[in-house]
Image (cartoon, grey):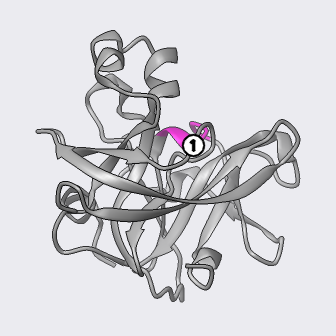
Amino acid sequence: MDNLSIYVMPVYRREGDERSFAGTAFCVEGYLVTAGHVLDADKRCYARTAGGRYYPLDYDRWLPRQLPAADRTGYDLAFYPVEGLHSPLVIADVNAGRNDSLDIVCYQWNGERAYRVDTSCIAGDVNDEGYQTIITADRITHGSSGCPVMSGNVVHGILTNGRDHVETTGMAPLRQRMEHNTCLMFTAEYIRRFMPLL
């Protein structure tokens, strides 16, 4: 997993400002991909590469720019085309099966800086809107949004929210059904459906 982790990176809202940490993005099939709500509307964000460089990401290049999904008119997903981007990660052809064991690489905030977290999860049910529950081995919190949920180099989904998000946004019926380490990922099927053609 460690050799693939260089294709997963933290996203910031201001260059060089650790406290502007917003979430996680990853490289796949010529794009940087993240959850739509990670982005700051109408503003440039920055992905920090493994070498510590802040890579500028202009808002108007994100696709499909249906951000965020909270208004029910879009999906919590965004693609940023990067010319010449090569990554061994690929989007799965089919969704993960119930009880499949998967890996997560994400960034989180410890109060002072963003740090990488590697953990595992078990896939659960898929709903009609393209989201699948996952139960994580370790609790993951703010900053993990936008990270890949993988098996080897195959991405089965993108983490969009967890119990913390559900509680703070007042989605009470869903909150009551979510256990402590439950998160939602946007499935491979839906990522492929919305991924623009290069």
Q: Residue at x 65, y 77 (%)?
A: 6
Q: Magenta segment range? A: 37-42
**In which image quadrant can residue 55 be found?**
bottom right
In the image, residue 127 above or below residue 144: above
Q: Residue at x 29, y 67 (%)?
A: 196
Residue 38 percent across, percent down from the top left: 56, 42
| Residue 170 is inside the magenta segment | no
**In which image quadrant can residue 89 be found?**
bottom left
In the image, residue 140 above or below residue 81: above
Q: What amino acid type is highlighted by mark number 1?
A: Ile
Which quadrant is the N terminus positioned in? bottom right
Q: Considering the numbered disc 1 on the image, is that residue within a helix, a strand or a loop?
A: loop
Residue 111 percent across, percent down from the top left: 83, 36
**In which image quadrant can residue 112 be found?**
top right
In the image, residue 87 above or below residue 163: below
Which quadrant is the C terminus positioned in? bottom left
Does residue 93 appear to the left or right of 3 in the view shown? left
Does residue 186 appear to the left or right of 150 in the view shown? left
Q: Residue at x 68, y 47 (%)?
A: 108
The residue under label 1 is 140
Residue 75 percent across, percent down from the top left: 31, 41
The rendered magenta stretch, by its main secondary structure, is classed as loop
| Residue 39 is inside the magenta segment | yes
